[in-house]
Structure formats: structure tokens, C-alpha cells
Image (cartoon, coloured by chain):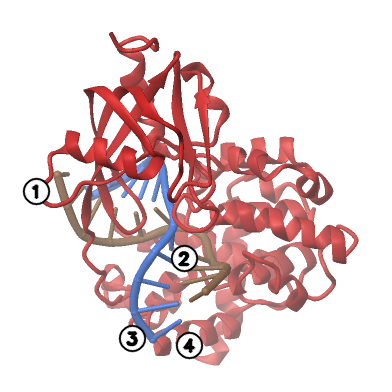
Chain colours: A red, B blue, C brown
Amino acid sequence: MTPREIPALRRRLLAWYDRGHRPLPWRESRDPYRIWVSEVMLQQTRVETALDYYRRFLGRFPTIARLAAAAPEAVLKAWEGLGYYARARNLHRAARALVERHGGRLPAEPEAFRALPGVGDYTAAAVYSIAFGRPLAVVDGNVRRVIARLLALSLAVDSAAGGRRVRETAERLLDRGRPGDFNQALMELGALVCTPRRPACPGCPIRAFCRAGREGAAADYPRKTRARPVPTVPVAVGVIFKNGRVLVTRRPERGLLGGLWEFPGGKIEPGEDPRAACRRELAEETGLAVEGLEPLGLVRHAYSHFRVVIHAFRCRFAAGRVRLRQATAHRWVSPSRLGELALPQATRRLLPLLQERGDGAPR
DNA sequence: AACGCGTGGTG
DNA sequence: TCACCAAGCGT
């Protein structure tokens, strides 16, 4: 793509965007906070998935000040099921930092915003271009794909050199008169036309400038380095009943599913019987001895970088006093009130297995 | 620089 | 069933 073609590309892309972009709720407001929340929710998350969460979250936390004043558990509960829970913790921390140090508003300079927890290059550029018209180019998965195809980029986009080429190109293409719309247009194109599989090249407004499209090879880009294999881990968890309540434990603040509640358990060792593993893990992780273990079923679940097969058991408290190993808190909860806690999807999927036998104590 | 970090849709 | 992927960030 020659330098003289760039203005035409900008015109074509913006005209296409103006003709019919999706009426998404975060496009109805110039409130920087609303734009920010949308950008955080959309990190590695599909638009359709984020929509319901977005409406509920802003109903509950309509301003930075209201978010900052909320309890961390309330924010986590609002995020439940959306995944990548560090986003919720960081958004909350960032809101508190803004109230304490910036009068509850976004700072004037994007660099100061970029320094907040959970705000990286992408989010800072997106918020400041869309909300404030700053000429900052975004590079997200859509932009990487569109540009890799425009250039027929042989470098892997997830390599250092490939990433530099993509960023340079994004900055060169950016329409400095309408940076927010241009950024959104490029992402909208990636989401609707220049899709990962079966890209709709005939309907593309900038196909005249696309090298991969001309070569009929759009689907061959972007090139990526080989993904690592995904291990599967067998796990045993126990739903311990005591006086009609069940024991749940809270995961450490940082790391996988940080701060969420779950049924205690742990890895099944190679060759170990699942029932024995459950008994052992409950003793190790909660300090409790249990009796009457009955299998509840099997749940398969995929996390971001590994899979689990969960062997779930129900049982009765037999002896001991709760002493936690990794968990940071525990509660004995009536099964009907489990929904008040922020639970991971895998744990949520165990609940129907509980209901099937009624939620009283096992015989 | 390369991992760790969720969940649901899709071919 | 499976691999791949989605408006990334922190360490």
C-alpha cells in the first residue's frame, strides 16, 4: 500500500463505518467511564457476551465514584461468569485510585491513565481516541488480523518484529481527524468482514488496498507461532454437608479465579482413586474428616490454559475443625444461598447435580 | 519474552 | 471432540 493510497483507504473505511456500524450501547455515550468499562469487558471477550454484563454493571456502578465506593465482593459478583477476573479487581482498584488522586475523573493525559492497574496500551489508546479524540492507534486482535492481511505479512503477528510492523502500520493508517471512529471502524471491519475464518472479501470496503485479498489468500493470515499443548488435570471436589449447609472456600486474591468461592478439593494424583483423592484433599485443604462419600457426577471444564475433569462427591462432615491451607476464608452456606457468592462457572455447573437429590443432607 | 489468566461460540 | 479464537494485561 503506497503512501498516496492511505487517504483513500481512510475515506472508504470511515464511509463504510458511517453507513452502518452496530448500535452498541457504549457507542451511545461519550462518558469516558462508560467507554472505559466497555473496553475492559471487551478484552478477549465477544461483544455479544459483554452486552448483558455491560448493562448490569453500569446500572449497578453508574459512575467512577459509585464503583470506587463498592465492596470488592460486589464488583466480583457483577463480573461472575465473564472470566479473567483480574479485570474486575483492577478496574475497581483503578476507580479507587482515580477518586483518591484525580478527583474521580480520568486524567487529562493518556500516560497517567495508562499507569492505572488493568490499563495497557490498547485500552489507553481506545479510551482516549474514542472519548477525547486523541490520535492514538489501537492494536487489538482485529487490527492485527486486518493489517496482516493488508500487508500479506509473512512475519508472525505475535512475534516482536511482526508486532512492530503492525503497530507502525496502524499508526500510519490512523485518521487523525477522527481517530476514535477510525479505530472502531478497523475493529468493526475485523469483527464483521475481515473475520478469522471465511473472510468476506467481496464485501470489504478496502479490498482494493489488500495484498492478501488480491492474492486470494486472506485466510492464510495472520500467521502465528504455534500454540502450546493444553494439559488436562483430573480433580476431585467434595460438597461437605453439615446441618443442612455446605462448605465453600474462597480462593486466594491473585491468580486463577482469584477471590471466587468454590467447593474444596484438589488434584487427583496419578493412579489415585478419585474417591480417595477427594477424602485426602478435603483433609489437607480444610482439615476436616468426612464420611459417606457419594459420587455426584463428572464435569469437564476448560480454563484459559488447561482443562480439568472434576470428580464431584457429596459427603457428611465427620470430624475436625476447619483449618485452611490455600483458601483465604470459608463459609457454611445453605445450598439455596450459594447464588449470592461469586462462583466460577465450573462450580456453578456442579449445582444442578446437588439439586437432583434435593438439598438436604445425604441419607 | 513467554507465560498465566475464563468463558462461550464456531467450524 | 477438538482446536481455535475473542475490542489484552501483568509479571
Q: Position of residue A195 (x, y in %)?
A: 38, 59
CA gap, disc 3 to disc 2? 17 Å
| Front disc: 2 or 1 | 1
Helix, strand or loop at disc 1? loop
Residue highlighted by disc 3: A155
Local packing at callout 1 (Cα closer than 10 Å; few below 14, some 14-19, many 20+) is few
Disc with the residue nearer the chain's start (4 vs 3): 3
Quarter assignment of residue A185: bottom right
Quarter assignment of residue A155: bottom left
Amino acid at pointer 1: Gly
Dots 1 and 3: beta carbons under 8 Å? no
Amino acid at pointer 3: Leu
Helix, strand or loop at disc 3? loop
Amino acid at pointer 4: Arg
Residue highlighted by disc 4: A164
Dots 1 and 4: beta carbons under 8 Å? no
Q: Position of residue A342 (x, y in %)?
A: 54, 36
